[in-house]
Image (cartoon, rainbow, N blue to C red):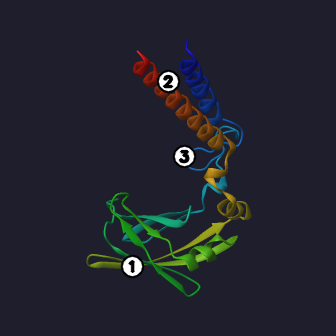
Amino acid sequence: MNRLSYFFLVFILAATSALGAPGAHGPDGEHLDGPAGHVDSSAGARIETYTELFELVGRLQGQELSILIDRYDTNQPVLNGKLEVELNGIKAQAKFHADQGDYAVDDAALLAALAKPGKHALMFTLTAGEDSDLLEATLEVSAKASAAREDHAPWASASTWIALAMLAALAVLLRRRNVRNNLNRKTS
C-alpha cells in the first residue's frame, strides 16, 4: 500500500469516528451520545396550534422561526399565503419558501425576543386565498435551549477542524505527487 492510500484510509477512519464522537449532534441538533429515545430540548422550541380552518406547527431553530401550515380538515399544505407574526407589539412578516413549503420569520427584533427563556404568547395572522384566520399559541423557550441557540457554532467543533486539516494535508500530498510525476516525465 503506498503512502497516499495509507493516508486516505487513515483520513476516512478519523473522519467517520469523529461523526459519532461524544458531543456530536444529529440532523435535528440532538446529542448522539445521549440515552436512546432521549429528545434534547435544545434542538429548538416547538409551537403548535389550530383553528377550524388551519393548523400551524413551528420551530425556533438557527436564525429563524420556521412554520408549516395546513388546512385543518384536509391536511393540505397552505402555500403562498400571507402570514404575520406578532409578539408583544413586535410584528414581522413571514417569507414563504417554495422549496421547503414553509414560512420563515427572520426579523432580528422578534428573534431576539423569542431567544429569551420563558413563555412567549404569539399571534399569527394568516390570509390564504379567500380565507383568513387568527391563530394564538405560546412558545416556551427553556434556559437550556436559549443558551444552546446562542452558543452553538457548527464550525467550532474539533472534529470539523480535524477533518479540514486532513483534507488540506491530502491536497498537499496530491499536489506533491503531481509535481513529482511531472518532473519524472520531463527528465525521461
Q: Could you tell me how far apart the alpha carbons at marks 2 and 1 are, in whole angstroms? A: 70 Å
At which x and y percent is residue 166? Answer: 60, 34
Q: Is residue 186 above or below residue 36?
A: above
At which x and y percent is residue 111? Answer: 58, 73
Residue 39 or residue 152, whichever sits in front: 152
Q: Could you tell me how far apart the alpha carbons at marks 1 and 3 are, in whole angstroms? A: 33 Å
| Left or right: 157 in relation to 102 | right
Identify the residue at the far front of this view: 187
Q: Amino acid at mark 1?
A: Asp
Q: Is residue 2 above or below residue 12?
A: above
Image quarter in which the N terminus is found: top right
| Left or right: 168 in relation to 145 | left
Residue 7 or residue 93, whichever sits in front: 7
The residue sitting at 37% across, 68% down in the picture is 96
The residue sitting at 46% across, 23% down in the picture is 183
Q: Could you tell me how far apart the alpha carbons at marks 3 and 2 are, in whole angstroms? A: 42 Å
| Left or right: 92 in relation to 33 | left
Give the structural element (helix, strand or loop) at label 3: loop
Q: Nearer the viewer, mark 2 or mark 1?
A: 2
Q: Are marks 3 and 2 in contact (CB under 8 Å)?
A: no
Give the structural element (helix, strand or loop) at label 2: helix
Q: Nearer the viewer, mark 1 or mark 3?
A: 3
Residue 21 or residue 13, whichever sits in front: 13
Which residue is labeled 1 in the image? 133
Which residue is labeled 3 in the image? 27
Q: Amino acid at mark 2?
A: Arg
At which x and y percent is residue 55? Answer: 42, 66
Q: Amino acid at mark 3?
A: Pro
Residue 16 or residue 82, whichever sits in front: 16
Which residue is labeled 2 in the image? 180
The residue sitting at 52% across, 67% down in the picture is 65
